[in-house]
Amino acid sequence: MKKPESSPFLVLIVLILSFVLLNSCGGVPEENSTSAASEGNVFSVDEVLEMVSKENDVTRTLYTKAIVGKGKLQGMKFDEDWRKDDVEAGPLPALFLRGVATSIRKGPIPLGLYLGSDFPINNANKFEGEQEKLFEEIKETQDPKFFYDESQKLHTAMFVDLASAQACVTCHNDHPQTAKTDWKLGDVMGATTWQYPKDSLSYTGALDVLNAYAKGTVDVYVEYLDEIAAFKSSEKPTIGDKWPEDGNYLPTPEVFLDSVRKLSSYETLKSLIASK
């Protein structure tokens, strides 16, 4: 399936950032070796990681509730082995996030992303050391934690990951490898961790981070639709402008991203412009 060239959300950000930069710099800045040097670093890394975290919250919630939750009611299947040739299913929400992280890692932006927990299904996702201690505090307050990871030389931010949809609760409680079987809606299931090497970013740098995340969501969603196209025995949902709540349908990547934009763009744009 062809990937959308860009989302309206990203186009809107580019237009607004261009206006902000022209007005704050008195014209187009001269080119030099780095964009940060010409623009000036105006965002702390904590601010940028918080922005991309909010984008992730909106995207994951939409995917979990509107695609997985409603899709299961239509008979659609979602499986941790969704990429295997003999499995005709889509990615579970945690695996959707992992796919986004993989896409980002393959790109040029040094943004790290992973999901951890104290009761993970996969032991590789269990928090250890400093992050384990901070997660205990996150469970109590649900406030994010920002710190510099000396061992990796990376600025790190941890954000609470809540059981926001029944699909998450049911899947984790029923999973054969689960370490906890009494999850309920609203529980703190884990934390999403973001990492970046620099302590501050320019407008362009912040936009690069947001674009890297948006591209990751497109990559995974398109991969899911490509899997559907290859189904041999399962009924294929119709891909278009309708959602599973209307029947055996899935939105195109453009429609999916447009819904993300409508839910998240105001807060992100407000954050981007606030530092002008």
Image: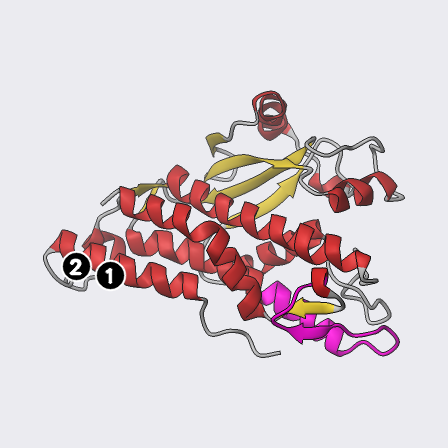
> Which quadrant holds the N terminus?
bottom right
What residue sits right under mark 1 in the picture?
18
The answer to if 127 sits in the magenta stretch is: no
Q: Would residue 53 appear left or right of 140 to someone viewing this image?
A: left
> Between 17 and 76, which is closer to the camera in this rendering?
76
**Amino acid found under the numbered disc labelled 2:** Leu
**Amino acid found under the numbered disc labelled 1:** Ser
> Which quadrant holds the C terminus?
top left
> Between 178 and 66, which is closer to the camera in this rendering?
66
- The x and y percentages for residue 85 are 82, 72
Q: Residue at x 84, y 67 (%)?
A: 87
Q: Would residue 89 appear left or right of 99 to someone viewing this image?
A: right
Q: Is residue 99 above or below residue 136?
A: below
**The label number, if any, that marks residue 257 in the structure image:** none
- The x and y percentages for residue 63 are 64, 55
Q: Which residues are magenta?
A: 219-244
Q: Is residue 185 above or below residue 170?
A: above
In the rendered picture of this protein, how many numbered marks are placed on residues? 2
Q: Residue at x 14, y 55 (%)?
A: 23
- Disc 2, SS: helix
**The label number, if any, that marks residue 22 in the structure image:** 2
Q: Is residue 276 above or below residue 149?
A: below
Distance of mark 1 from mark 2, alpha carbons? Answer: 6 Å
Quadrant hosting residue 28: bottom left
